[in-house]
Amino acid sequence: MELQAALATHRLVAIVRGSDADAALDTVLTLAEEGVELIEVSLTGADALTVIARARAALGAARPLGAGTVLTAADARAARDAGADFLVTPALGEAVGTARELELPVLAGVFTPTEIVAARSLGATALKIFPAAQAGGPAYLAALRGPFPHEPLVPVGGVDEEAARAYLAAGATAVGVGSPLVGDAADGGSLTALRTRARAFTAAVREATR
């Protein structure tokens, strides 16, 4: 898949991490129904590889589906085998190189300008600024745009609706959103409430993109 183009088009990545595999699957499918095009399932969630495999079967081959918190080469290969077609890492490590070997796009976790340069030299497709809130929020993202005007930057960590608008206004290619969007749905919480949050986030992203 063309991850960089998809990030620039859809501008929102939902991050699903749940303690209940069935609920996590329902969360993925509900987000997809609500028009969230880019979804990653964190490997730290319960039975995450099975969730990815079941979601892939339900969504079909054409729908983007990522694996998150990919740390090792083994993680990368297992995620690919389960059906993930893009990978997300929290930091730079062997999974970035393995993703390139597997010809999978990778959103690689970085925190500093030095790590941005290193990630691109390793072949990262896009750059996950993490943890974004602790790094300085939208002001930090805007500062990075000075030396890196064309890099695909995706802030993750503490991104609520208001912050999403601010990051996109500051020049983020997309935003990654976990608990402010997913809430407790992936632990068995309300899917109705999830739909409400999904509609609010997709509307916020559309407004910021105009």
Image (cartoon, grey):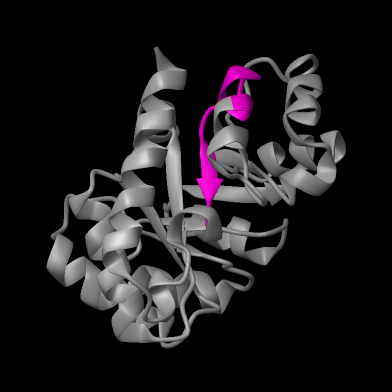
Pick the residue in front: 67 or 202: 202
Q: Is residue 32 left or right of residue 123?
A: left
Q: Is residue 182 above or below residue 127?
A: below
* Displayed quadrant of residue 117: top right
Which residue corresponds to the image point at 22% horizontal and 67% vertical from the top-left?
A: 56
Whether residue 1 can be seen here: no
Q: Residue 168 in magenta?
A: yes
Residue 108 visible here: yes
Image position of 54 with respect to 70: above or below:
below
Residue in the picture at 62% in, 26% down? 166
Where is residue 151? Give x, y as percent. Answer: 63, 25
Q: Which residues are magenta?
A: 166-178
Look at 81% across and 21% down and name the residue there. 143
Q: Is residue 131 left or right of residue 199?
A: right
140 drawn magenta:
no
Examine the image and state in which quarter residue 73 appears: bottom right
